[in-house]
Image: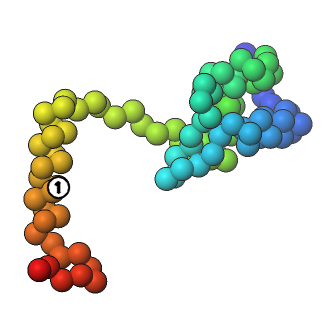
Amino acid sequence: MRKTMTHVQAVALGEKLRTICETKCGVAVYAEGWDDARVVREMGDAYSDVSVRNLRAAMFGPLPKPSKPASIAELQARIERLEEWAAQRPVQGFRRT
């Protein structure tokens, strides 16, 4: 059976989310130890994972997508390419000597 939040429940959920979640760089970031699943557990049976996810997304944005971890060698090569690229460009407002 589908759970439907009442207006009062949605307000309570929004108030809780404001204390544990914020937006950084366009994505939602929970406080340490919090996630959608914990919010559902803490708020009680009246709240579903879908209702928490939808309200969190509406208020703070989506959660960041997990990225594929790169190997140390891949990261080192990328850093070296970026350093080479940056060395070829003048820093705005400064002259190369």
Q: Residue at x 77, y 35 (%)?
A: 16
- How many other residues sit within 10 Å of disc 1, few (<14), some (14-19) or many (≥20)? few
Q: Is the C terminus in the top left, top right, bottom left or bottom right quadrant? A: bottom left
Q: Amino acid at mark 1?
A: Leu
Write down the quadrant of residue 95 in the picture: bottom left
Pinpoint residue 14: horizontal percent, then vertical percent. Answer: 77, 40
| Residue at the image point whose x is 24% and y is 81% from the top | 94
Q: Is residue 2 visible?
A: no
How many marks are shown on the rendered structure?
Answer: 1
Label 1: element kind: helix
**What is the x, y in percent for residue 12?**
84, 36
- Give the residue number, with chain letter if any, for mark 1: 82
Is 85 located above or below residue 56 in the figure?
Answer: below
Quick one: quadrant of the N terminus? top right
Q: Quadrant of residue 20?
A: top right
Image position of 88 with respect to 64: above or below = below
Residue drawn at (78%, 16%) of the image: 45
Q: Hey, which quadrant is residue 34 in on the image?
A: top right
